[in-house]
Amino acid sequence: MIEINDRNQSFYSPQPLFIGAFFSMQQIAQIAWLYRLWKLDSKKPVERAELDEMVDYAPYFAVGNLCIGTWMIFWNSEQLKISNIFVIINSLSQLYYCFGKLRPMDTRSTTSVLTHVVAKTFAGIGVLDLIQNGSVAYFKDAPATMTVKVMTGLGFGLLSAASDWIFGGCMVYDLAALAVGQSGSWRNLLAVYAVGAAGIVAAKNLAMPPYNKVSSGYKQTATEDIQDRV
């Protein structure tokens, strides 16, 4: 895969080791999420409520992994335009779930925290996948134009302003990966964007803490509590 990457470069090509490192950590989070999904007991009312949250994300989780696996087949055969179709499906579906369907995080719930981590890191690296694969598929060996530079700053700036710590951290990571993978003045500008994105994410989330420390409000009856203990 690295050989394919080295032969197909563009203005949005990141340092590939950053991608590998990110996916390695994300796989650990996904395994933990799957274990949690398997472990929860739908017969217990409290756990059933948590299971509902995981089941709500499960189709997007499945689509994302299916798209990544299919992308890999076409990427390794250097059919970049076809591979880009699956990147688009994955990235847009993950972004839609994170910004349109994901419930607020309850920091007292392991299930809620895991779901946010998996969904938002999937979407976060999906942003980098989207611009990288699209650029090498249609703009191979092209330099970054002024339009690209302006749109990159605006796009990542807006995403950072709409982010919590998790997704916002991914935006900073994406920009850092791009900066290390590029060269010259474009590399320097991407580094500035990374620092700026970090500042935006920190300022926004310190001013407006994003996470809910209050549980969903579900209370067990005495009978349900006994059933859970049994």
Image (spheres, rainbow, N blue to C red):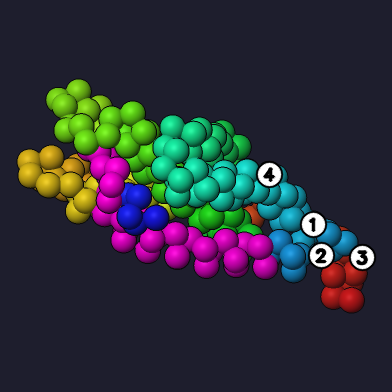
Rendered location of residue 208, percent (x, y)? 38, 44
Identify the residue position indicated by label 4 in the image. Answer: 59
Comes first in the chain, label 2 or label 1? 2
Q: Residues within 10 Å of mark 4 (few under 14, many from 20)?
A: few
Identify the residue position indicated by label 1 in the image. Answer: 48
The amino acid type, in three-letter code, at marker 4 is Pro
Comes first in the chain, label 4 or label 2? 2
Q: Is residue 45 visible?
A: yes
Disc 1, SS:
helix
Rendered location of residue 147, percent (x, y)? 20, 23
Comes first in the chain, label 3 or label 4? 4
Tell me which segment is drawn in magenta.
6-35
The amino acid type, in three-letter code, at marker 1 is Arg
Q: Residue placed farthest to the left in the image?
A: 185
**Disc number for residue 223:** 3
Identify the residue position indicated by label 2 in the image. Answer: 41
42 versus 78 height, above or below: below
CA distance for labels 3 and 2:
17 Å
Q: Residue placed farthest to the front in the image?
A: 77
Rendered location of residue 202, percent (x, y)? 29, 50
Indicate the quadrant where residue 228 lies. Answer: bottom right
Is 136 situated left or right of 92 in this image?
Answer: left
Q: Is residue 57 visible?
A: no
Q: Residues within 10 Å of mark 2 (few under 14, many from 20)?
A: some
Residue at the image point whose x is 18% and y is 47% from the top: 182
The amino acid type, in three-letter code, at marker 2 is Asp
Residue at the image point whose x is 68% and y is 65% from the top: 36
Disc 4, SS:
helix
